[in-house]
Image (spheres, rainbow, N blue to C red):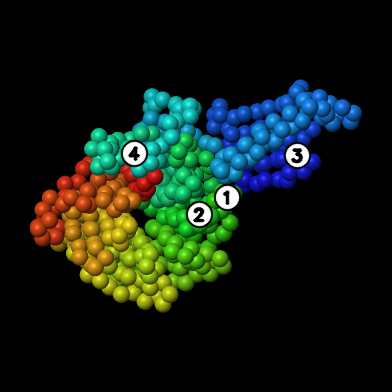
Amino acid sequence: MTGVRGVDAGRVGVRGVDAGRVGVRGVDAGRVGVRGVDAGGGDVRGVDVRGSDVRGSGGRTTGVRGARVRAALRRLTLGLLAAALLAGCTTGPTEAAPGTTGTPHTPNTPATSGSTATAAPAPSRSVPTPTPEGTLLVADFGSDTVTFVDPGRDGSGRNGGPIASVEVGTAPYGLVVGEDGRAWVATAEGVAVVDTQRRTRLALIPYETETGPVTTGEYRGGGMGIALAPDGRHVYVGVNVPGGNGTLEVVDTATCEVTGVVGVGRRPFDVDVSPDGREVYATNHDSFDVTAVDADTLRTRRMEVAPYGTEGGLGSWLKPHYAVVRPQDGRLLLPFEGERLAVLDPRSGKVTIERMTAGTHQHGAALAPDGTLLVVGTGPIGSADEGPSLTVRAPDGEERIVPLEGPHEDVAVSADGSTAYVTRGFTRDGYWNGITVVDLDKPDNLDAPATPNNERNKPIRLSAGNRPLGIAIL
């Protein structure tokens, strides 16, 4: 927790967050002490200005020199206070060269948190150059890091590549970035908070939910989907509990503390928030449903979303994965198998079905600014299925299918809607360490029919990250 404790009789104390605690302790009788900011050599201790005082009777600072000292102390204290409130969390590991931090994982084997690859250089302790706008941030499910990626010339992927990686915690999955530049990353251990400008981990907030031993792999416990409230005050993370129902945990972004926990369905793959911030939606993969959570009371409503039925239970492939919330009406769009788009009205719980054309198993989804829906096709689950693809679905329902090479997981779209960035991590075998960049504005042949086997765009493969899953654009 970051708290500000009174300005009283010339005393200011800011008590920081544990895990490399940042604390600013008292300006008292002319003394300022700065403790913490412990990032392996990044701390500042004992700025003691008692020797600069002019003391009168009773130890009180007097005279012009004393006034100057007090003014200097006030400026120093306010600066430290502002910095502490802006950060909201503590300082942790800083950036390292891409691919040198963390240990690559084999699915379903225990992780060695905090370890480094053989002969890897130590993380840099210098202050990095601020991260450029438009940089991509991916969650490296295979190496306990997030990687910052240059998207290349004009965001096209050409001449792009990784900038730096920051260790965040075991097997990071989803991530979201706020207006203040902090990224919130769902790992197996807790929610990591990353300063994206300085490329530094600020905190790792442990879950309140008991998820068992920290492991890796597709079915690991811990955070999966994650979303930020529209006002930026809370982060909501879906926590998987192996063998049982999951939870939704609420994190206060000012204090970096878990302030609420509520039960949801099994394996909350994705989390979304209503446009007005009043409801949070957990898309629960293994229970064929979406849990609506009242953001104020944490009361829940279960809404089944199973356009193919629930036959097969845990063994079924025909379950919900990711959703997006349509801003104009608040409905949730959930793609299934490149055949059916489930449109869920969260007010009534009613589901309507619209036809899709990709004919392939689908995971990640995103909305472009103009309402175009992008859906990631991971590849076939049956002999009649089509290969991996990106569905580009216009608001009127017309679809264009862009073939992709190999399984993919999630997608983000540029602010102008011209470029899609698709992660190739995937939760199962067949992944590749990189991102596929798709130019949405320049299909090769505008007159060609929109079929899965007709390549209308030529995607660019951008090598970056380690089994990247979640993605955001800074």
Q: Is 413 rendered above or below residue 292?
A: above
Judged left or right of residue 22, residue 74 is right
Structural distance between the alpha carbons of marks 2 and 3: 31 Å
Q: Mark 2 points at which residue?
A: 232
Q: Is 182 rendered above or below residue 282?
A: above
Structural distance between the alpha carbons of marks 4 and 1: 27 Å
- The quadrant of the rendering that contains the C terminus is top left
Q: Is 135 rendered above or below residue 97?
A: below
In front of the other: 300 or 356: 356
Q: Residue 254 has which mark?
A: 1
**CB contact under 8 Å: marks 2 and 1:** no
Mark 2 / mark 3, whichever is N-terminal: 3
- Residue 461 in picture, x, y percent from top left: 22, 41
Mark 4 / mark 1, whichever is N-terminal: 4
Residue 302 visible in image:
yes
Q: In which quarter of the image is residue 350?
A: bottom left
Q: Mark 3 points at which residue?
A: 11
Judged left or right of residue 150, residue 158 is left
- Residue kind at label 3, given as amino acid type: Arg
Q: Name the residue under label 4.
A: 149
Going 34% across and 38% down the picture, which residue do you hit? Answer: 149
Mark 1 / mark 3, whichever is N-terminal: 3
- Residue 192 in picture, x, y percent from top left: 49, 45
- Residue kind at label 2, given as amino acid type: Gly
Judged left or right of residue 241, residue 328 is left
**CB contact under 8 Å: marks 2 and 3:** no
Structural distance between the alpha carbons of marks 2 and 1: 9 Å
Within 10 Å of the Cα at label 4, are there few (<14), some (14-19), or many (20+) other Cα atoms? many
- Residue kind at label 1, given as amino acid type: Ala
